[in-house]
Image: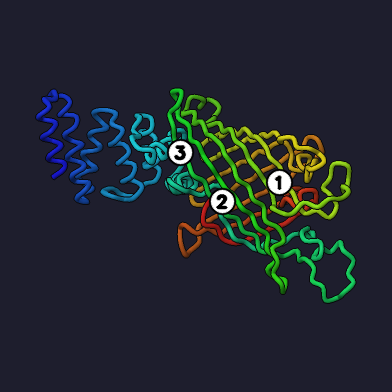
């Protein structure tokens, strides 16, 4: 009924024949769409895009390819149509803007499985979606980790019944983000707030203490380049602020070294501004990240030399092959002449396409804030629910 009223209203306003001709197929397609007659809607929408660059039709075609409505499921085609919709400037709602802005600068991948993995990697949920991987795994390190002094192996053992940290522990991460798209200054931007929490749980001890938890809130803005820099594969630039801390109390005392943490204190924190650039070459994605630590008063600074161990930036390379996602990240420290590396891999489980086997290996400094100045090599295996 609403569609009929809209149609007659347009007639009563004496719109010219050309405008009505352009609008009528979309109204008809929408009617079929609402009645779940997707095959009929698909054929009309396809004709709309052939006659003109109709962004609304392109958006619906992308959705139909992604959800197998009226056409065989094809995630590679879905990405292409979403990209066309963005280029044709659909986006009358922020939800569509976000979806289309994200995919507008993504080049086609080599096959449908790779495209499907990329869709899940990038899209997530519109209101609140995954940021870093959300995982639960058991990890084993070659070094007894730091934490509460009473559990550390560095403290002399007086009572043989006292428990000590084990190299085997449970590690999990929760990471979410919220986005909002704007078109200020004549260009699209994605404004984002993110929160990541990584916890290290000594679950195999009788008392099962949490050894360490790192809290990392962020604020950042992404500028997609919409293929303006395709010659080098540059897809977007990000400016952001990040805080990292472990929420432990501050303790007064002497420093373990001139720029090291305060002896006996478990408090660790730092703040930084960063610049990221995203690149894509086929199924390869890379991120270059450089940051600047915000200076603090050395007297109250928990860890003045933390940047010497975490480095001044990172380089990350991700490869998608069908349903397999491989990622490698390196944090080089120019000041100290050391580097840390992390490699991760995820692949869907037999239980669900949205639950993944997750493997992570790490070597170097900065495994956690409490361990930032301790070299650790460890490997973990578990499951993740996002990539």
70 with respect to 117 (left or right):
left
How many other residues sit within 10 Å of disc 3, few (<14), some (14-19) or many (≥20)?
some
The residue drawn where x is 58% and y is 57% is 135
Numbered label attached to residue 175: 2
Q: Nearer the viewer, residue 208 or 29?
A: 208
The residue drawn where x is 65% and y is 58% is 199
Q: Position of residue 251 (x, y in %)?
A: 81, 52
Quadrant into which the N terminus falls:
top left
Q: Could you tell me if the residues under marks 3 and 1 are in contact, i.e. CB atoms within 8 Å?
A: no
Q: Which circle, 3 or 1, is nearer the viewer? A: 3
Q: Check disc 3 and report the residue beneath it.
A: 180
Residue at disc 2, secondary structure: strand
Residue at disc 1, secondary structure: strand
Q: Position of residue 29 (x, y in %)?
A: 20, 41
Q: Could you tell me if the residues under marks 2 and 3 are in contact, i.e. CB atoms within 8 Å?
A: no
Mark 2 → mark 3, Cα distance in angstroms: 17 Å
Q: Check disc 1 and report the residue beneath it.
A: 341
């Amino acid at each position: 009924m609403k569609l009929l009223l809209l149609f007659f209203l347009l007639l009563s306003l004496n719109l010219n024949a050309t405008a009505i001709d352009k609008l009528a197929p979309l109204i008809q397609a929408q009617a079929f769409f609402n009645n779940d007659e997707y095959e009929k809607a698909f054929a009309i929408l396809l004709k709309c895009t052939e006659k003109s660059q109709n962004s609304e039709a392109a958006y619906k075609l992308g959705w139909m390819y992604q959800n197998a409505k009226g056409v065989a499921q094809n995630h590679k085609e879905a990405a292409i149509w979403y990209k066309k919709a963005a280029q044709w400037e659909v986006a009358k709602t922020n939800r569509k803007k976000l979806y289309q802005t994200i995919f507008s600068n993504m080049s086609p991948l080599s096959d449908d499985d790779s495209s499907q993995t990329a869709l899940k990697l990038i899209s997530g949920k519109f209101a609140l979606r995954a940021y870093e991987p959300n995982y639960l795994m058991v990890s084993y390190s070659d070094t007894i980790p730091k934490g509460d002094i009473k559990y550390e192996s560095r403290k002399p053992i007086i009572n043989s019944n006292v428990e000590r940290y084990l190299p085997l522990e449970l590690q999990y991460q929760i990471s979410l983000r919220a986005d909002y798209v704007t078109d200020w200054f004549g260009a699209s931007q994605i404004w984002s707030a993110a929160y990541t929490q990584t916890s290290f749980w000594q679950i195999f001890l009788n008392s099962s203490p949490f050894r360490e938890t790192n809290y990392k809130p962020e604020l950042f803005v992404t500028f997609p380049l919409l293929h303006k820099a395709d010659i080098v594969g540059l897809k977007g630039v990000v400016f952001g602020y990040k805080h990292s801390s472990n929420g432990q109390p501050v303790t007064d005392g002497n420093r373990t070294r001139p720029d090291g943490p305060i002896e006996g204190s478990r408090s660790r924190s730092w703040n930084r501004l960063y610049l990221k650039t995203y690149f894509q070459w086929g199924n390869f994605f890379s991120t270059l990240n450089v940051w600047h630590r915000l200076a603090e008063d050395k007297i109250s600074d928990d860890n003045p030399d933390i940047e010497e161990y975490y480095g001044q930036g990172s380089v990350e390379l991700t490869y998608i092959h069908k349903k397999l996602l491989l990622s490698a990240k390196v944090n080089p420290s120019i000041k100290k002449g050391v580097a840390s590396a992390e490699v991760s891999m995820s692949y869907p489980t037999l239980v669900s396409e949205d639950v993944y086997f997750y493997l992570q290996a790490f070597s170097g400094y900065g495994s956690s804030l409490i361990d930032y100045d301790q070299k650790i090599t460890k490997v973990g295996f578990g499951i993740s629910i996002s990539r």
